[in-house]
Image: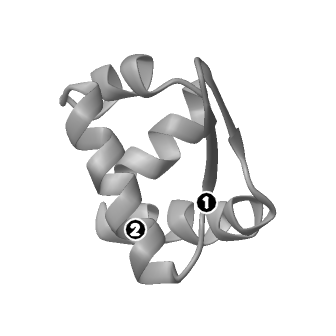
Amino acid sequence: MESFVAVTEELHFGRSAWWVHLTASPVSRAVKVLERDVGGALLLRECHHVELTPLGTEFLPLARLVIAERSC
């Protein structure tokens, strides 16, 4: 979830990877696993462009809440 939230903040896999102390490839894989787990695409990936899908927009507040609860 941290990778997903980081990508939503930066809208770029490479820049978001810095925030979660990974490279872009593991961030992308983590988001794909999360998408599989929630049952749909959270991000629309196009050549050098990333944006939230409607499901991603809906899921983002929950992801932030889960991360905040884990850090307590």
Question: In the image, 47: left or right of 14?
Answer: right
Q: Secondary structure at mark 2?
A: helix
Q: Position of residue 57 (x, y in %)?
A: 75, 59
Q: At x 42% / y 75%, what residue is drawn?
A: 36
Q: Which residue is mark 1?
A: 42
Q: At x 24% / y 34%, what residue is drawn?
A: 25
Q: Nearer the viewer, residue 47 or 41?
A: 47
Q: How is the image coloured?
A: one colour
Label 2 near label 1: C-beta < 8 Å?
Answer: yes
Q: Amino acid at mark 2?
A: Leu
Is residue 41 placed above or below 19 in the rendered structure?
below
Q: Give the image quarter of residue 50.
A: top right
Is residue 10 placed above or below 7 in the rendered structure?
above
Q: Total number of numbered labels?
A: 2
Q: At x 30% / y 41%, what residue is drawn?
A: 27
Q: Nearer the viewer, residue 44 or 65?
A: 44
- Residue 1 in view: no
Q: Which residue is mark 2?
A: 34
Q: Position of residue 66 (x, y in %)?
A: 45, 71
Is residue 37 placed above or below 58 in the rendered structure?
below
Q: Position of residue 59 (x, y in %)?
A: 65, 69
Quadrant showing the C terminus: bottom left
Q: Position of residue 58 (x, y in %)?
A: 75, 69
Answer few, some or many: residues within 10 Å of disc 1's Cα (few below 14, many 20 plus, some between 14 and 19). many
Q: Secondary structure at mark 1?
A: loop
